[in-house]
Amino acid sequence: AQSVTQLGSHVSVSEGALVLLRCNYSSSVPPYLFWYVQYPNQGLQLLLKYTSAATLVKGINGFEAEFKKSETSFHLTKPSAHMSDAAEYFCAVSDDSGYALNFGKGTSLLVTP
Amino acid sequence: KAGVTQTPRYLIKTRGQQVTLSCSPISGHRSVSWYQQTPGQGLQFLFEYFSETQRNKGNFPGRFSGRQFSNSRSEMNVSTLELGDSALYLCASSPGLVAGELFFGEGSRLTVL
């Protein structure tokens, strides 16, 4: 079964610092991987998606993620954190059917002035 | 283009009651998925419908059911509510492609007393 593990339930960075949110996947086949963001009292919004076209995926709001098969990782990064980036971030993998997502537990990002 | 609309946004029920939640997908989207989000279990897949057919179902008891109408609108029902059913229920729509992007609504927050 496809699954993802997010390392670190809480991450705190200073405004302007690098954001690094970690995600490792477990999949027996090449996976479809996603990063979603959830702001308070809102639904989830897609940040980016990996579909094997390119290992470095660029998303919205300056985020990007690199697929590393050798490390089974799909970490999310942003060079410079903004206060508005404070939110919950979820890594997800498409399940065996392709019609559902298996989400990680989420990482809460705190950005301090 | 209007987003995914979920109603009601908030509701309070007591144990043993039943509840029906509604979801209107983005126009043109034929797939609707439901997810349960709780602090303890995170985001868990409930079921997915495409053109009125359930294509995939998560690991939830039979008290959880859903359906999709010919206009792609969907409802989910939970019968004999338990305290543990308190959660944010998120609906997502998509065109229905394998591993396609999901567009989430803001959710229906259910509190069971």
Image: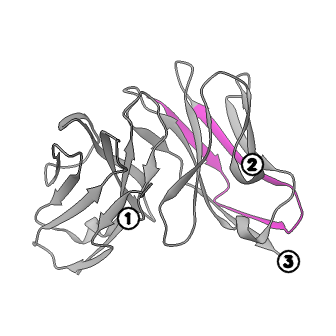
Q: Chain of mark 3?
A: A
Q: Nearer the viewer, residue A2 or A42?
A: A42
Q: Chain of mark 1?
A: B
Residue A55 image position (x, y, % from top left): 73, 26
Magenta span contains residue A113: no
Q: Chain of mark 2?
A: A
Task: Give the color scheme: rainbow, by chain, secondary structure or one colour.
Answer: one colour
- Occupied quadrant, residue B7: bottom left
Q: Nearer the viewer, mark 2 or mark 3?
A: 2
Q: Magenta stretch: give its range.
A: A1-25
Disc 3 designates what residue? A113
Label 3: how many Cα within 10 Å (few below 14, some 14–19, many 20+): few
Whole-angstrom CA distance, mark 2 to mark 3, is 20 Å
Disc 1 designates what residue? B107
Residue at point 70%, 44% (across, down): A59
Q: Which mark is residue A63?
A: 2
Classify A68 as above or below B58: above
Q: Which mark is residue B5?
A: none
The secondary structure that dominates the magenta segment is strand
